[in-house]
Image (spheres, grey):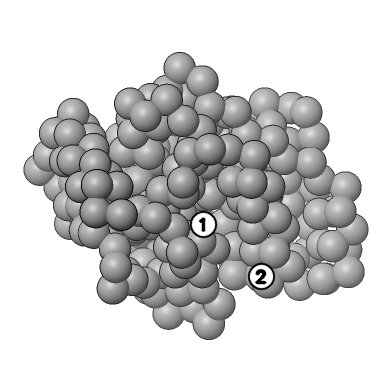
Amino acid sequence: MVIAIDGTSSSGKSTVSRALGSHLKCKVIGTGSIYRAVASKMLYLNVDIKNLEHLKQVLDTTNIKTEFKDGKTKIYVDGVLQESKVLNSHEVSVFVPKVAILPIVRAFVKSIQYNEANNSDVIIVEGRDIGSVVFPNAEIKLYIDADLKTRASRRLEDYKRQGKNYTLEQVMQELDERDNQDRNRAISPLIMTSDAIIIDTSNQDVITIIKKIDAIIKEKLSNK
């Protein structure tokens, strides 16, 4: 069974996915982390992403593995564990939309998602086009969202932990631009499918949200 979780940036998709994965005792794939890992490697190698031939060469020699244990998702690139502070840095956050929009990169990430799903009885896949493009026939589809100020406050706290100094207004602008990019891109735009269930995380704690999702899953399965 595939549980597809989509939603806006910093809406709590990853937090909800990890908590749900721990509750259901199943694997979790954070698609955003995979794209961030790819973007981070491109930045590190100073790859010109407009040079598709070079980009393909790099992707062909890139090995990404995911691991979900004790409520945490770990990403390994070429056997090296990626630090969350690097993957969630401002530099990667700004660069990742430019990488994620490329068909060659999306195909690379999709192959990882399919491989993981084919080897799992139950899996949670979280991203922005999971229910619409990657797994359109997923048994459970959730759309996670929160208001812009709440999302910006969460991202701002992440930056503060990294020692980065930004204002709430700057982060709100960053997320607003990211939303526009995600929703208006030509390839796999962020959309809420008609069969997705909206979960607003603005004023709800994780425990309440997981109880709500657990009830949704049980109801869906009982109606099969």
Give amino acid for label 2. Leu
Q: Is residue 43 left or right of residue 202?
A: right
Quick one: quadrant of the C terminus? Answer: bottom left
Q: Residues within 10 Å of mark 1 (few under 14, many from 20)?
A: some
Q: Residue at x 55, y 77 (%)?
A: 187
Disc 2: CA contacts within 10 A as few (<14), some (14-19) or many (>=20): some
Disc 1: which residue: 94
Please identify the quarter of the rendering in which residue 99 is found: bottom right
- x, y (%) of residue 48? 78, 64
User: For this rendering, which residue is in front, 221 or 98?
Assistant: 221
Q: Is residue 148 visible?
A: no
Q: Is residue 38 left or right of residue 16?
A: right
Check disc 2 and report its element: helix, strand or loop: loop
Disc 1 residue type (three-letter): Val
Q: Which residue is mark 2?
A: 102
Measured as percent of width and height from the top left, residue 30 is found at 50, 43
Question: Residue 26, percent across and down?
Answer: 46, 30
Residue sitting at x 81%, y 54%? 59
In the rendered image, residue 129, in percent from the top left (x then y), is placed at: 47, 64
111 horizontally vs 203: left or right: right
Q: Secondary structure at mark 1?
A: helix
When the figure is inspected, residue 95 is found, relative to residue 78, above or below; the finding is: below
Task: Give the distance between the C-alpha atoms of the residues marked 2 and 1, in whole angstroms.
Answer: 15 Å
Task: Say which quarter of the image contains residue 128.
Answer: bottom left
**Residue 202 visible to the viewer:** yes
